[in-house]
Image: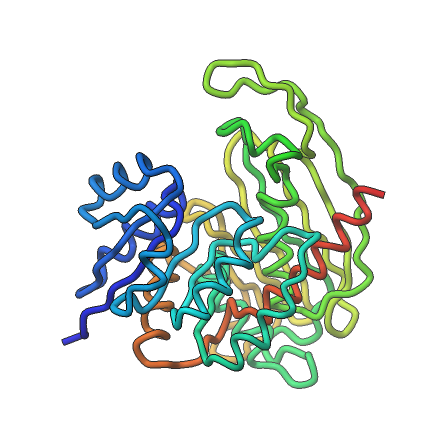
Amino acid sequence: MMKKLKIGIIGCGKQAEKHILSLKKIPNISLVLTDINLQAAEELAKRTDSVWVKTREEIFTDPSIKAVIICTPTSTHIELIKEAINAGKDVFCEKPLCEYQQDPSELKELIKKTDRIVMIGYIYRFVPVFEEAYRLIKEQSIDGISLLFGKILSAYFRLGGRGSHQVWKHKKATGGGAINEMLVHMVDLANWYFGPLRDIEVISCDLRCPKRIINGKEVIADAEDFVMIRCYGQNGVEIYCQADLITPVFTQYVEIQAENGSFMGSIQADMPSYIFLKESRGGYPAGKTQMGYGYRNVWDIQMLTFIQAILTRSPLDRNTIEDSIELHKIMKEIKRQVEK
């Protein structure tokens, strides 16, 4: 039987509840919640049958709490991660790692010294169809050439949603916009497959729907709601990443063309996901093979991976601090081009 594991949750907003629901499905997990908004902490604790405390210090100083999950505003992430590590806790932190003007590099050395597990929450890396694509493109390759697909010729990553759910997501001052909310996920996937990315170029960055109706009220948005970048990856593959907050219904997919065929995949169960090969290789036949994974709760998969790493003291195979530091550099360059 798995030993009892107590975990602290810092920040009790929408993302925290998703993680709590996933954690509750794992045996022998107990949770302690906190938030600067005490009412939010109390209400979420009541809804999820958890314990809550008034301050994060109570979590950091409790030796029975072995790990923390950070679901607070981005600007607080670095300091909270440092506090947690110095208190001897393993850490899961919501994306992104930090604001663009912050420097996360010191965390790498701190983690190395303390042997703590620190995972950053980029959820798309846990989608089964994207895991399989990673295996075929990155893991089963020689000198960057996929044994299944051959040389990769082009790649397109898209993520679109309608927005208009929360005011802050459309305001620059609160870190809103398509770059922070959407593009970062697709750039992370692109970097996972083909990194290190280079020659980043912002092709388009616009505010196309400045007037929004949010919770029945008209809101004037000032953060971008459409963005597209071009960059290059391993062996010179040309990559496009596009994200927006103007698509009427959530839409996400990755399309990759290669010498021996193509890959099409999506987090959406109702979108086509398949491999097409000109020649049979690697256990896949020539022609189209549907990749019928159906719906998977990727939040469950992500949390289970984190818990397993804690209990076994195994190094993470994705979503490491090094991954996020590299992604931070790319996103910082995108922001620099947009703001100049």
Q: Residue furthest right?
A: 340
- Which residue extends farthest bottom? 142
In-image side of 123 versus 297 (left or right): right
Q: Quadrant of the N terminus?
A: bottom left
Q: Is residue 289 visible?
A: no
Question: Relative to 297, does residue 307 appear above or below in the rendering?
Answer: below
Q: Depth check: give the residue in front, 19 or 205.
A: 19
Q: How is the image coloured?
A: rainbow
Q: Residue 193's quadrant in the figure? A: bottom right
How far from the left and from the top, in percent, is residue 20? Answer: 30, 51
Q: Residue at x 31, y 56 (%)?
A: 58
Which residue is most to the left?
1
Task: Work out whether residue 316 or residue 321 is closer to the camera in this orientation and state it.
Answer: 321
* Residue 72 drawn above or below residue 261: above
Q: Is residue 146 visible?
A: yes
Residue sitting at 43 percent across and 50 percent down?
71
The percent position of residue 327, horizontal first and vertical second, equals 65, 62
Which corner quadrant of the image does residue 227 belong to? top right
**Left or right of residue 289, residue 89 in this image:** left
Quarter of the rendering occupied by the C terminus: top right
> Residue 287 is drawn in which quadrant?
bottom right
> Residue 336 at what x, y percent from top left?
79, 49
Which of these two is toward me, 253 or 323? 323
Q: Can you give x and y, in whole percent of width and height, for residue 38 in the image?
A: 33, 38
Residue at 68% x, 59% y: name it. Answer: 155
- The front one of 172 and 252 is 172
Residue found 51% across the figure and 14% down from its top: 217
| In this picture, residue 148 sits left or right of residue 269 | right
255 in relation to 192, above or below? above
